[in-house]
Image (spheres, helix red, strand yellow):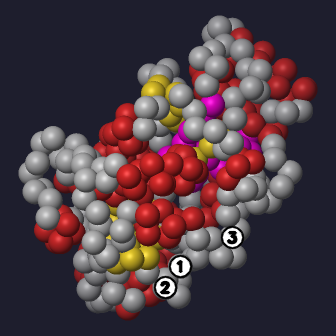
Amino acid sequence: MNKKRVMSLEEKLPSVPEAIYLFRSCTGTLQYPGVENAIRHICGLMGIEVIMDPDQTCCSGYLLTCSAYLPEFSLAVTARNHALAEKRNLDIYTFCNGCYAYNCEFAHLLEDQKTRDTANQLIGRFGYNYQGRAKVYHVQELYYRLKDRIAEKMVYPLKGLRVAAHYGCHYLLQEGVIDDFDLPTFHEEILQALGATPVYYTERRACCGYGVGKVFTHKEEVVLPHLLNKLSSIRDEGAQLITTVCPGCNVAMDREQPHLSQMGRGEFQIPVIDLGQLIALSLGASPVKLGFNANTIKLDGILEYLGIDKGAQV
């Protein structure tokens, strides 16, 4: 595992890969499947092959956090999932902050030889072998590496669209990330490259509030009041759109807006999409392909602002 808290982009991702192993997210794939299409669209235009494996499973960190089973299970799951990328000699790219964090942390634990041997003993009976060769990245790091090339290929510049970036806690709290937790800026730099106007709001660094466990046990008392502060801060700064890099955060801020309104906590109609979806949209991907119909808060106003036909199938 990286020992540096923050790494330069040149250290973390010194070159653009020819192919990536995309680690699918259970929340992202089920709730907002258009995110995967967005990643494929972006990478395709950049000449990067995207490879997935139907044999891959959930990272299992969610259930471990809820104490559903012993850690050995998650370590074996991680070893097996990483072995799928290793047999292709590819590094792993996630589009979920939770998947990124759990894959990094479990891989760190698997550096211990005894722990690795135990995991391999479990998965070896099914024909898998973990060697610890695959590195773990978040696709947002790749977007940042490619931001100038992306800007050159834009079909729909974002015309000053006011966008509030949500970084999410699970990425910035890891070691070896490309920006500092206290004042990250790389999302805003990507937004500016696309022609958008980044919105800096008071609760910018705050978690979405959808912590594992809390959403089941203290949703009304803890989660929703926290989320109310976050969304109110974004609304007060006049943001037209929110971008995330974690489907869990997307669920929190998109799905819960009507609930807050029903509780009399204020009206919110701010669309929330993945950063990759916004990039792909600017690169000409159709709203249909990007799965915007899965959103609770619709993007009709954003598409009209950008002059994009919401029914386009291209």
* Main secondary structure of the magenta stretch: helix
Residue, x 90% and y 26% (percent of image)? 113
Q: Can residue 219 be seen in this snapshot?
A: no
Query: In the depicted view, which residue is nearer to us: 148 or 312?
Result: 148
Kindly check if marks 2 and 3 are in contact, taking CB atoms under 8 A apart as contact.
no
Percent x, y of residue 31: 34, 49
In the picture shown, does residue 163 fall above or below 120? below
The amino acid pointed to by label 1 is Arg
- Crowdedness of circle 1 by 10 Å Cα count: few (<14), some, many (20+)? many
The amino acid pointed to by label 3 is Phe
Kindly check if marks 1 and 2 are in contact, taking CB atoms under 8 A apart as contact.
yes
Of pointers 1 and 3, the one earlier in the residue sequence: 3
Query: In the depicted view, which residue is nearer to us: 32 or 187?
Result: 187
The amino acid pointed to by label 2 is Tyr
Q: Does residue 94 show up magenta in the picture? A: yes
Task: State the CA–CA distance, disc 2 to disc 3.
Answer: 15 Å
Q: Secondary structure at mark 2?
A: loop
Q: Which residue is mark 1?
A: 204
In the picture shown, does residue 302 fall above or below 203? above
Task: State the CA–CA distance, disc 1 to disc 2.
Answer: 5 Å
Q: State left or right for residue 34 relative to residue 52.
A: left
Q: Which residue is mark 3?
A: 181
Of pointers 2 and 3, the one earlier in the residue sequence: 3
Circle on res. 201: 2
Percent x, y of residue 256: 35, 70
Q: Secondary structure at mark 3?
A: loop
Which residues fall within the magenta stretch?
91-106
